[in-house]
Image: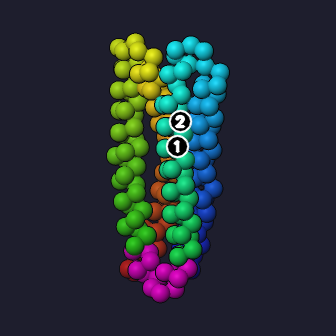
Amino acid sequence: MEILKAATDWAKAELFSTPFFILFGGLFVLASIGFWQLGKTEMAKAYIIPTLVAGVLLMIIGFGLFFTNKSRLANFPAAYERDASAFVESELARAEATLKEYQTIVFKAIPLIIAACALVIVFIDKPIWRASMITTIAMLVVILLIDGTAHARIDAYNKQLELVEKQERN
């Protein structure tokens, strides 16, 4: 029963953090509107579309994660009651797969994309390219910040699952 509490605590923490994607997405959309209404220079006007796209993407990520975790939270008690060991096993597999994805995507691919965007900024002088790369970097930094804390939470949850699995074997 202790692992059910850990699972629900983890899912509730995820439900708390995913709206930050939505918040930052909204801020990007507001920035886009601001550039559209107030932008006088070519560079300011170049930010309209990239910030709008980044904002919409962050909002999609936020809503997707929110509703996924909300349904997962609702299903935890029933899954645990059906078969506690199968619940632990499936959650452990999901947590380990998520941790591997974080290692590949969040901590390797995103920094490489940020570096590539920085190089484009240095070598290309067109306002739309610069605005797009700066916006991409900003969006990826937001993802890194939010996913960095999510990684720490799922890592702690994974350790709890491993401990429960070890106890079940003994």
Is 159 or 15 nearer to us in this picture?
15
- Residue 122, compared with residue 134, is above or below; it is above
Report the residue marked by disc 2.
52
- Would you say residue 157 sits in the magenta stretch? no
- Residue 151, compared with residue 137, is above or below; it is below
Label 1 Cα crowd, 10 Å radius (few <14 / some 14-19 / many 20+): some
Position in image of residue 25 (x %, y %): 57, 42
- Would you say residue 81 sits in the magenta stretch? yes
Label 2 Cα crowd, 10 Å radius (few <14 / some 14-19 / many 20+): many
Residue extending furthest front? 37
Quadrant where the image shows the C terminus: bottom left
Question: In terms of image quadrants, where is residue 130?
Answer: top left
Position in image of residue 115 (x %, y %): 38, 27
Q: Amino acid at mark 2?
A: Leu
Report the residue marked by disc 1.
56
What residue appears at the point 60 percent right and 59 percent down from the top-left corner? 15
Q: Is residue 168 visible?
A: no
Q: Indicate left or right for 26 with 107 as reference.
A: right
Q: Indicate left or right for 123 with 19 as reference.
A: left
Position in image of residue 50 (x %, y %): 48, 31
Residue range in magenta is 77-89
Q: Secondary structure at mark 2?
A: helix
Is 121 or 76 nearer to us in this picture?
121
Do labels 1 and 2 touch, CB within 8 Å? yes
